[in-house]
Structure formats: C-alpha cells, structure tokens
C-alpha cells in the first residue's frame, strides 16, 4: 500500500493524469526484460490514443473504446495492433486473450462502485500472471458522484477493491 499511495500522491499526478500514467507505463515497459513483440498491452477507453505513441510500435497494443470517432482518430496514429468498439465490461467478459499490461486512463470516474469492482475482477481475469493494471481515478474524500457527473473515490475504497482481488501488490 505504501508504494501505491506514493504513486497516487506523486507530484506528477497533479501535473496531468495522462502524463503521469504515460510516464509510469513507459518506465515499466523500458525495464521489462522481455522482447517487446511478446508483450501484450490492453488500453481500455483509449480515446484518441494519447497514452501510446509510435515508439511503442514493437508491442502488441489492443484498444477498446465505446466511441467510433475515438477509434477512427486513434487508428490514424498507427500505434494500435487492434482496435475494438465495445463496452469495456462486455469486452472483458468475452475476451479470450491475456495481457501483460492493462491501462485505463480517465475511465474509472465513469464507473460506479459496483462497475469498478467488476472491472477490476475482469481485468485480473484478462491478465497474465504478474500482469499490471494502471488506472487513474478522481480522488475524493468519500465515494460520490460529483457535480461534473464523475465518480470520486477515496483511496481506501480503491485499496479495498484491489486487496479483495489480490492486486494491491501491483501498485
């Protein structure tokens, strides 16, 4: 939990959640001793595909997003090996692939607590042993739907979900 909390409170987090996650994922990828072509990454709710760039072309990167417009924009970047238009939870239920890294930048705040619990469980099921799940969330003092229509989560709620799924050691 200390490592997780330090990443949440890291000064880069206030700078920009996309840049923070991007730096974290890219640092971990650069330390991964495996051949990049053997590493499978799943990018959930990828939007226009800002988390990954052409320098990541050696990895297998699959993206899932609800929006056809987002898929079209991300496709122009030629970074993703496969793009799928789908509801994230429904996709994960049907997925037969296992991934080494799963990312969800600016996605969790759209999920209720029940949906988040299901998401974490499904990501665990779609991950290879030792897989890592990176995600950002709106931090709040308590779980609530804020005035912008996003869910806020206190750290202890997130930790409980991760501990229940035996995933806290990945953060």
Image (tube, rainbow, N blue to C red):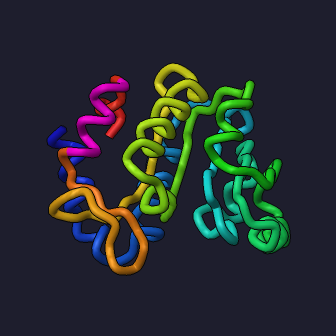
Q: Is residue 162 magenta?
A: yes
* Residue drawn at x 28%, y 45% as measured from the top left: 158
Look at the picture and state if 130 lies above or below 27: above
Q: Main secondary structure of the magenta part?
A: helix
Classify residue 128 as left or right of residue 92: left
Classify residue 71 as left or right of residue 165: right
Which residue is at the front of the view, 69 or 38?
Answer: 69
Percent x, y of residue 83:
80, 53
Q: Is residue 99 magenta?
A: no
Look at the picture and state if 19 lies above or below 7: below
Percent x, y of residue 88:
64, 47
* Residue drawn at x 21%, y 51% as measured from the top left: 155
Which residue is at the front of the view, 25 or 34?
Answer: 25
Percent x, y of residue 123:
54, 34
Count up the numbered dots: 0
* Residue drawn at x 54%, y 49% as measured from the top left: 103
Classify residue 20 as left or right of residue 106: left
Percent x, y of residue 71:
79, 65
* Residue drawn at x 48%, y 61% as measured from the top left: 110
Which residue is at the front of the view, 85 or 169?
Answer: 85
Q: Quadrant of the N terminus?
A: top left
Numbered range of the magenta stretch:
157-165
Q: Where on the picture, by quarter, is residue 68? A: bottom right
Q: Where on the picture, by quarter, is residue 102? A: top right
Q: Quadrant of the C terminus?
A: top left
Look at the picture and state if 114 lies above or below 80: above
Look at the picture and state if 72 lies above or below 86: below
């Amino acid at each position: 939990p200390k490592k997780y909390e330090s990443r949440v409170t890291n000064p880069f987090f206030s700078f920009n959640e996309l840049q923070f996650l991007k730096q974290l994922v890219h640092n971990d990828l650069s330390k991964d001793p495996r051949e990049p072509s053997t590493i499978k990454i799943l990018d959930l709710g990828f939007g226009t595909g800002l988390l990954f760039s052409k320098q990541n072309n050696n990895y297998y990167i699959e993206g899932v997003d609800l929006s056809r417009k987002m898929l079209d924009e991300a496709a122009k970047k030629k970074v993703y090996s496969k793009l799928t238009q789908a509801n994230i939870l429904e996709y994960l239920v049907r997925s037969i692939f296992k991934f080494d890294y799963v990312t969800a930048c600016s996605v969790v705040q759209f999920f209720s607590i029940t949906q988040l619990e299901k998401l974490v469980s499904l990501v665990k099921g779609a991950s290879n042993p030792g897989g890592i799940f990176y995600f950002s969330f709106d931090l709040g003092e308590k779980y609530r739907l804020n005035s912008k229509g996003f869910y806020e989560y206190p750290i202890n709620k997130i930790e409980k979900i991760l501990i229940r799924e035996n995933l806290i050691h990945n953060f």
